[in-house]
């Protein structure tokens, strides 16, 4: 440091901060813009976003294309089969992938000390959580939902002579988004409560597996308060099939869970001692 | 800059306990503007806990603290806008380069203009000697390089208060010297509050010192005062050649002498004379000794301590309580 520091005119360096424009943000969202830019940069300024996109395209589009090419069904039945593969699989596997990818998002920063470093700057704790939530939501939306869904739509149109209507398909994609946000906010919330990845992955994956294993056995009144019926709802909406009248309830309940878990994450992280 | 009675940091009975264990007990500190304030203590004394509370990273369990007159709990964000902080073991995002880290830090404080922010980043990189490594990912940095980056990111926002937790701990002697030089230069522009256990560094650059032990403040004073005995009676040390027994009686009989101890070794006698009037001691002591024509004074001066002695004696006293 000494050689370089000699060449530097400290008087100039340390002089006033003329001309710089101070950041003006509301206290509870202080630092949000900068945090969000950094989080999105981590997705799209590194290989992470493109690797995620490649993985999801290979899994979701790969499997659904194989189904489209190998099932020897009449066009309408084939369309139904392909949509019933793609959308429920998207809700499930993207949820699982979210837990695996996001499990270290908060805990990793707590363990490494970067969370404490960021919070020592004019960054509100709410901004820290909300920037992560938004960046991961956008990242997963683009890499795991938007690009694979667009490719799926184009592929289906190319391979199956029966048209898949766009608007109902978008409703189905909307349900995939709701499911992904559920697992995202669940994992982030767990990250604020725990200090190691084990319980976060365990609870997140456990909840997902419980949906697969217990869905048929638990009472309807409990089931509709969970995101577990979302895969069937997504496929049903996209195909215009008849759904049980209560189908909006699991969607609304999941949306409420998303809000509740975000509030819980904000509350817990606000009390974190670094 | 608003301050609390002219103090940049003002704590009142600031306390922190973790699950019944008192990490900090009733800390009262006043850090003057533009001072370099050394915050000393052995490991586990509560230094980092105090710093974390000042930055809003942890909450006090009792008491309060003001920085620039703003409450550290209720107005933490406003406080952090004026502060630069270097953690004890600084960690950054490994995928970012040093330049990106400084840019990220600067953008918490300034929204533009871009060219001025970039110029400031360049200046900081040069200041800490990382300009040749500015575009390498941090994950390959050594501990010393991370520390230098830490100093740059702490200073990038022109802070009015710089809080440094063990700033020189991970540096080699040259690096330490450079950090101390930077701190001395920054004094004109900012107040520096830093914790350390490297006592030589404290003695070199600090104006004021606080010593913490087991979560309690055991001393707080300007460095000179601490080295001169921190309010206790001044002690003069005299080394005499020859038989000093008569002179000892003369000096010990003076009203301004509180105590006199003598130790003879190799034909020399060394006195430690504690006095209650410095002027009288300096005016009269030598004359009283030299009344005896056979005596020769080899050395005379007010006894000063080095910080290590002060630190060890204070921390040791606490331990024995």
Image (cartoon, coloured by chain):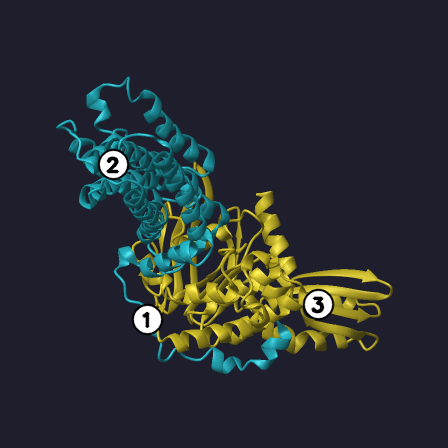
Chain colours: A cyan, B yellow
Vertical position of residue A67 compared to residue B227: above or below:
above
Q: Residues within 10 Å of mark 2 (few under 14, many from 20)?
A: some
The one nearer the camera, B299 or A120, is: A120
Residue shown at the point (48%, 82%) measured from the top left? A12
Which quadrant of the view contains residue B268? Answer: bottom right
| Residue where numbered disc 2 is placed | A257
Q: Dot 1 lies on which element? A: strand
Marks 1 and 2 sit apart, C-alpha to C-alpha, by 37 Å
Q: Look at the image and tell me in which quarter the N terminus of chain B lies.
A: bottom left
Q: Position of residue B34 (x, y in %)?
A: 45, 72
Q: Nearer the viewer, mark 1 or mark 2?
A: 2
For the residues labelled 1 and 2, say whether their Cβ atoms are less than 8 Å apart: no
Question: x, y (%) of residue A87?
Answer: 29, 37
| Chain at numbered mark 2 | A
Q: Residue at x 63, y 62 (%)?
A: B171
| Residue A22 marker | 1
Where, quadrant-wise, is the C terminus of chain B in this rendering?
A: top right
Q: Comparing marks 3 and 1, which lies closer to the viewer?
A: 1
**Which residue does the numbered mark 3 point to in the structure image?**
B237
Identify the secondary structure beneath mark 3: strand
Chain under callout 3: B
**Residue A206 location, quadrant:** top left
Q: Nearer the viewer's eye, disc 3 or disc 2?
A: 2
Q: Residue B315, position in %: x, y?
A: 59, 50
Distance Cα–Cα, label 3 vs label 1: 57 Å
């Amino acid at each position: 440091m000494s050689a370089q520091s000699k060449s530097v005119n400290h008087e100039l360096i340390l002089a006033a901060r003329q001309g710089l424009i101070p950041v003006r943000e509301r206290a509870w969202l202080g630092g949000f813009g900068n945090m969000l830019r950094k989080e999105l940069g981590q997705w799209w300024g590194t290989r992470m976003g493109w690797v995620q996109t490649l993985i999801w395209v290979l899994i979701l589009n790969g499997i659904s294309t194989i189904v489209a090419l190998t099932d020897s069904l009449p066009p309408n039945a084939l369309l139904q089969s392909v949509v019933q593969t793609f959308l429920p699989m998207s809700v499930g596997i993207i949820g699982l992938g979210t837990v695996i990818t996001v499990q270290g998002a908060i805990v990793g920063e707590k363990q490494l000390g970067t969370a404490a470093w960021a919070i020592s700057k004019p960054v509100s704790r709410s901004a820290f959580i909300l920037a992560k939530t938004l960046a991961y939501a956008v990242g997963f939306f683009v890499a795991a939902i938007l690009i694979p869904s667009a490719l799926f739509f184009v592929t289906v149109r190319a391979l199956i002579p029966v048209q898949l209507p766009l608007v109902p398909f978008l409703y189905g994609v909307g349900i995939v988004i709701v499911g992904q946000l559920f697992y995202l906010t669940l994992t982030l919330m767990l990250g604020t409560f725990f200090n190691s990845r084990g319980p976060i992955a365990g609870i997140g994956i456990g909840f997902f597996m419980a949906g697969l294993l217990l869905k048929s056995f638990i009472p309807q009144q409990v089931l509709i308060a969970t995101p577990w019926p979302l895969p069937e709802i997504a496929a049903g909406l996209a195909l215009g099939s008849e759904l049980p009248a209560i189908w909006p309830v699991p969607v609304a309940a999941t949306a409420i869970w998303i809000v509740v878990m975000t509030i819980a994450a904000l509350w817990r992280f606000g009390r974190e001692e670094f | 800059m608003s301050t609390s009675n002219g103090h940049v940091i003002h704590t009142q009975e600031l306390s922190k306990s973790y699950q019944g264990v008192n990490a900090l007990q009733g800390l009262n500190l006043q850090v003057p503007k533009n001072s370099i304030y050394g915050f000393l203590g052995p490991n586990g004394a509560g230094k980092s806990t105090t710093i974390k509370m000042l930055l809003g990273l942890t909450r006090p369990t009792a008491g309060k603290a003001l920085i620039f007159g703003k409450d550290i709990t209720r107005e933490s964000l406003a406080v952090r806008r004026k502060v630069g902080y270097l953690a004890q073991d600084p960690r950054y995002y490994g995928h970012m380069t040093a330049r990106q880290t400084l840019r990220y830090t600067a953008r918490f404080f300034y929204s533009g203009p871009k060219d001025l922010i970039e110029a400031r980043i360049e200046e900081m990189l040069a200041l800490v000697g990382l300009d040749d490594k500015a575009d390498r990912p941090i994950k390959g940095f050594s501990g010393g390089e991370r520390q230098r980056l830490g100093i740059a990111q702490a200073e990038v926002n022109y802070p009015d208060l710089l809080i440094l937790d063990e700033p020189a701990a991970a540096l080699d002697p040259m690096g330490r010297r450079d950090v101390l030089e930077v701190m001395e230069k920054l004094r004109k522009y900012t107040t520096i509050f830093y914790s350390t256990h490297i006592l030589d560094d404290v003695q070199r650059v600090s104006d004021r010192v606080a010593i913490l032990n087991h979560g309690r403040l055991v001393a707080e004073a300007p460095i000179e005062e601490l080295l001169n005995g921190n309010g206790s009676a001044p002690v003069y040390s005299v080394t005499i050649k020859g038989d000093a027994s008569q002179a000892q009686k003369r000096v010990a009989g003076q009203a301004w002498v509180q105590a006199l101890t003598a130790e003879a070794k190799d034909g020399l006698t060394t006195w430690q004379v504690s006095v209650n009037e410095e002027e009288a001691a300096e005016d009269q002591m030598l004359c009283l000794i030299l009344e005896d024509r056979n005596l020769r004074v080899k050395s005379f001066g007010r006894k000063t301590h080095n910080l290590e002695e002060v630190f060890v004696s204070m921390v040791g006293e606490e331990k024995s309580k």
